[in-house]
Amino acid sequence: MTTYTKLVKELNNDEDPLMKVISSQLKQLFELPIHNIPVDTENLRPQDLEMISKIFPGLNTSFSLSDMFNHMQKFNEQLSDQKNFKDLRRYSLENLPAFSSLKDTSLQTINDTLKASPCGKTLDEMINEHNNGKPVSLNQKFISGFMILNLFGLDQEKNKKANYISLSNDAQHAFYATYSDFLITEDEGLRTKAKVMYENFALKTIVFSAEEFFAYTGNMVTHTQLSIMDFINRVKIDIAPDRLIETTQSTKFNRLTSLYSPVTSYFDYFDLIEFIDDVDTGKGIILRPNKYMQLSYLFYEEIKLITNKIHASFGNDSENKDQFDMELESKAINKGVWEGRIWVLPGAYINLEINKGTQQLSLCIIFVPEKTNGI
């Protein structure tokens, strides 16, 4: 491969005699014929040898390590060729732990199946191994895992229909759907693989067929239609033991914070609830989005959309601010002085703001201490 050739050349050009020796040794190593490396082929079946020869042919010839690396790189690039991809997938379906017969496709079942197989690794361990243990983006990890599940036949797709480019597109669609609340598709294989990957990386996107989605939304509470008091009462209902995710105690601030997952998102945006019980400042609730990627910015259009949705339910705030003014408020946001909206109520007030710590749009309910009994 070019990388190794460049490395040898750079070492040889180094003035240090030791580097020149290393360069010479590496060159000899990369030119070493494969047949000089002990490879036990006696226990390999014909189909094993056939697949190995596709990845690096010339196992028993003068085929060198350098040739092998180059061919493996080309083989990887040639996977977009239908025949090469189908050959690799056919081999994996016939010889690796098959998922096609699994009735339960939960992450735990898949990991148990993999661990009990010759692979001996969980899905996450295989993903990390595929990326050589290097720190890579979530996108890269997600795509690797999605491909692994296809090669093991989790989607039960017939090999004659397998298509590398379509699979790659499906993987990207499933990944970018994590920016949304739902992935809706009629492709059962895509749904199955996406559910496993979302569970593996603890992503909250829900996967539906169109029929399932319509049934789900038909039972949803439309939070954008709630009055301001109905909204507060609905939030209190969501702060329930069965919705609790975690609780943390801060001795520094003398504060107990409990994190809840609401039944549905509020204003199609806020899908996490923090209940804060602070000895010094009292009790409060913060609604925020559960974005797994912590963005250091917010889009003006995003803030405008959410502000106007809340205004449609709550009306003008206590300072008589109505809908979002793009020209004026975008400038205030850019300068870090945006005041958002505030609705003052008996015993509490609601504040829409950009949280200075997380840089996320947050909707806060702050209770006046003497009115917090029963919260």
Image (tube, rainbow, N blue to C red):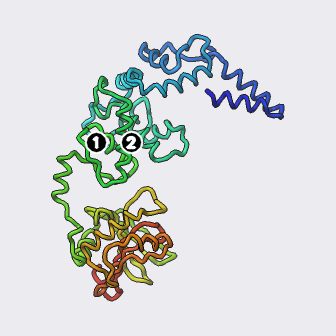
In the visual, does 249 lie left or right of 304? right
| Amino acid type, mark 2 | Gln
Q: Residue at x 35, y 28 (%)?
A: 163
Q: For numbered disc 1, what is the local secondary structure?
A: helix
Asked which quadrant contains residue 193, the reply is top left
Where does residue 341 sit, x and y in percent of width and height? 36, 77
Where does residue 213 sit, x and y in percent of width and height? 20, 51
Quick one: label 1 or label 2, which is nearer the N terminus?
A: 2
- In terms of depth relative to the viewer, which is nearer, 43 or 261? 261
| Amino acid type, mark 1 | Arg
Q: Residue at x 74, y 25 (%)?
A: 25
Where does residue 67 sit, x and y in percent of width and height? 60, 20
In the visual, does 215 lie left or right of 254? left
Instruction: Name above or below for residue 359 compared with residue 57.
Output: below
Residue most toward the top? Answer: 61
Q: Are marks 1 and 2 in contact (CB under 8 Å)?
A: no
Instruction: Name above or below for residue 196 compared with residue 43.
Output: below
In the visual, does 110 lie left or right of 45? left
Instruction: Name above or below for residue 346 compared with residue 307.
Output: below
Circle 1 Cα neighbour tier, 10 Å, few/some/many (<14 / 14–19 / ≥20): many
Report the residue marked by disc 1: 191
Report the residue marked by disc 2: 172
Quick one: quadrant of the C terminus?
bottom left
Q: Residue at x 47, y 78 (%)?
A: 254
User: Residue 87: which disc?
Assistant: none
Q: Residue at x 21, y 72 (%)?
A: 226
Q: Is residue 95 visible?
A: no
Residues under labels 1 and 2: Cα distance?
13 Å
Q: Is residue 365 visible?
A: yes
Circle 2 Cα neighbour tier, 10 Å, few/some/many (<14 / 14–19 / ≥20): some
Where does residue 47 sit, x and y in percent of width and height? 41, 16
Q: How many marks?
A: 2
